[in-house]
């Protein structure tokens, strides 16, 4: 599949490497290609392009930008380039402006997933993967052999089915569809616990497992 990843941080890098390994055609979108290349400590696993170019050619788009700027980043990619497409939203609304622990810049009655869906009503937004660290997103088997849980939120059943198929390629087995995009509030609000677990456990390589 032709996939445009918006985000040059650890999520963008890790997922683009994994998607290339799985045979997908990946382009990484950034605001300023030359500036991003100049500050990179190692080559990117897929070609860089402007956010608009990465989104225009993609069949599926991944938002791996900071949650506080996701609507701005996707606006830069162009609403017309998102229309009708599946947009996987991995962002979290973590605000580190007052240090650790971060607080959520949006919660309870709204979420970044909903902000993105409202801003781009023709996009088919699916919130997922935001509850695990990048390495676990790409290779769930590295934690407890993959016996743990991932959540999906979104308004479009076909879009969620497409995303679930891609997640199974990564190795995810226990994928729980929570319902419409408002359910992203719950998974984004798992982050305050997640960051405290990271400190308590001394690692980012863990996940929640739903037992039922
Ligand atoms: P990040 O440092 O949170 O975000 C990097 C990206 O944000 C860059 O691509 C940058 O674009 C973009 N960005 C920053 N300011 C911008 C602005 N004003 N306008 C447009 N774009 C802007 O990267 P990350 O750590 O890989 O995380 C990506 C997202 O995934 C975040 O929302 C994070 O909460 C979530 N998440 C991360 C992890 C993890 O393991 N790191 C796990 C779960 C969820 P340029 O390339 O143009 O500079």
Image (spheres, helix red, strand yellow):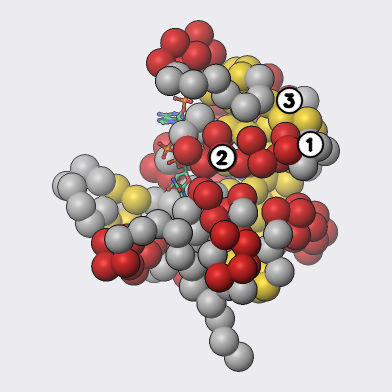
Q: Residue 203, image x and y in percent? A: 36, 58
Residue extending furthest toward the bottom: 212
Asked if residue 212 lies left or right of residue 91, the reply is: right
Judge by depth and name the residue closer to the eye, 163 or 11.
11
Task: Tell me if mark 1 has few (under 14), some (14-19) or many (20+) residues whose alpha carbon lies within 10 angstroms of its own.
Answer: some
Residue 115 visible: no
Task: Tell me the distance, in whole angstroms, between the alpha carbons under discs 3 and 2.
Answer: 22 Å
What residue sits right under mark 1 in the picture? Answer: 24
Q: Residue at x 73, y 38 (%)?
A: 21
Q: Nearer the viewer, mark 3 or mark 2?
A: 2
Q: Residues within 10 Å of mark 3 (few under 14, many from 20)?
A: some
Q: Residue at x 30, y 61 (%)?
A: 202
**Is ligand 1 closer than 8 angstroms to the Cβ of mark 2?**
yes
Q: Do the residues under discs 3 and 2 have CB atoms within 8 angstroms?
A: no
Question: Residue 161: x, y in percent?
Answer: 80, 61
Q: Which residue is mark 3?
A: 56
Provide the secondary structure element on which disc 3 rests: helix
| Mark linked to residue 52 | none
The alpha-carbon separation of the residues under discs 1 and 3 comes to 16 Å
Instruction: Tell me where residue 135 appears, x and y as whole percent.
Output: 53, 49
Mark 1, ligand 1, within 8 Å: the answer is no
């Amino acid at each position: 599949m032709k996939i445009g990843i918006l985000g040059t941080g650890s999520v963008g890098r890790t997922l683009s490497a994994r998607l290339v390994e799985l045979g997908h055609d990946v382009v990484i979108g950034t605001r300023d290609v030359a500036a991003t290349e100049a500050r990179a400590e190692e080559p990117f696993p897929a070609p860089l392009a402007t956010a608009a170019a990465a989104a225009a050619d993609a069949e599926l788009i991944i938002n791996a930008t900071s949650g506080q700027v996701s609507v701005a980043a996707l606006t830069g990619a162009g609403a017309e380039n998102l229309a009708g497409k599946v947009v996987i939203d991995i962002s979290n609304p973590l605000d580190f402006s007052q240090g650790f622990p971060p607080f959520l810049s949006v919660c309870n009655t709204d979420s970044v997933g909903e902000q993105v869906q409202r801003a781009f009503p023709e996009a088919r937004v699916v919130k997922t993967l935001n509850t695990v660290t990048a390495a676990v997103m790409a290779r769930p088997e590295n934690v407890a052999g993959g016996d743990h849980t991932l959540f999906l939120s979104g308004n479009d059943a076909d879009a969620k089915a497409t995303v679930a198929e891609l997640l199974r390629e990564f190795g995810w087995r226990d994928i729980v569809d929570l319902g419409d995009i408002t359910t992203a509030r719950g998974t984004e609000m798992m982050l305050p616990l997640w960051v405290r677990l990271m400190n308590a456990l001394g690692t980012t390589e863990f996940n929640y497992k739903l037992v039922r």
